[in-house]
Amino acid sequence: MNNKVFIMLANGFELIEAMAPVDILRRAGLDVLTVSTLEESLEVESAQKVKIIADVNISEINIGEGVMVVIPGGFPGYINLRTDSKIIEVVETYLNDKNKFVGSICGGPTLLGLNNLIGDYKFTCHSSVKDEMNSENYIHQDIVIDRNLITGIGAGKSLEFGFALAEKLVNKEVIERVKNGMELL
């Protein structure tokens, strides 16, 4: 089974929205790669000024080899992602393949709204950006799953978002083992 997940990082990403899913998905045994979207640099700085060394650069990945792409929020990270043609292409490719998944949280879903990819998908996002989505399908919930799109409302729901992503790729027993290990059960 393909279990490669790409977490896209641009300068200004929200630390907890990217790293909580990395932690949960790796605990679940998935092959998670943090991806720098910066030209020829693996070092990416979060909105909180924490520097992360990504696993790979966007130029080094084979877009088709993953099963999931994750777009975190964070300001101005989500703006940097939604205006990057390479990231838009990856998200569109994954969204159009019903065997792949797109996860996005907080301001991240605006990539789909502003690039006319949201279509008839139901979604959530941070309330401050819902008007940028160009869609009436906003649902004010912590996590919204519609087909192969998993969206989260914001940083405070990063753990729930990470588990919603994991539930698409691993069985219930693995989820329970990870939650037990994190003292969540």
Image (spheres, rainbow, N blue to C red):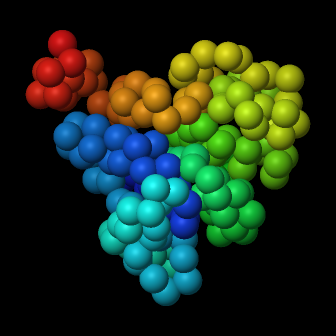
Above or below for 162 versus 80: above
Can residue 69 be seen by looking at this rendering? Answer: no
Point out the residue furthest to the front here: 49
Measured from the top left, where is residue 79 in percent x and y?
70, 57
Quadrant of the rendered image containing residue 176:
top left
User: Residue 60 is drawn in which quadrant?
Assistant: bottom left
- The residue at 43%/33% (across/down) is 158
Q: Residue at x 37, y 30 (%)?
A: 159
Q: Position of residue 116 (x, y in %)?
A: 84, 46
Number of numbered tags placed on the structure image: 0
Q: Tell me which residue sits at (59%, 22%) in the image.
A: 144
Tell me where residue 52 appears, x and y as whole percent.
36, 66
- In depth, the one of 43 and 5 nearer the eye is 43
Query: From where the camera sits, is residue 114 visible?
Result: yes
In the picture provided, is 55 more to the left or to the right than 67? Answer: left
Quarter the N terminus occupies? top left
From this view, report whether residue 8 is shown above or below residue 57.
above
Left or right: residue 12 compared with residue 28? right
Task: Please give the name of the residue rendered at 55% of the width and 83% of the height, measured from the top-left corner.
Answer: 39
Seen from the viewer's position, the closer of residues 155 and 20 is 155
In the rendered image, the quadrant that contains the C terminus is: top left
Location of residue 122 with respect to 31 vertically, above or below = above
Horizontal and vertical percent position of residue 138: 75, 22
Farthest residue to the top: give it: 185
The quadrant in which residue 86 appears is bottom right
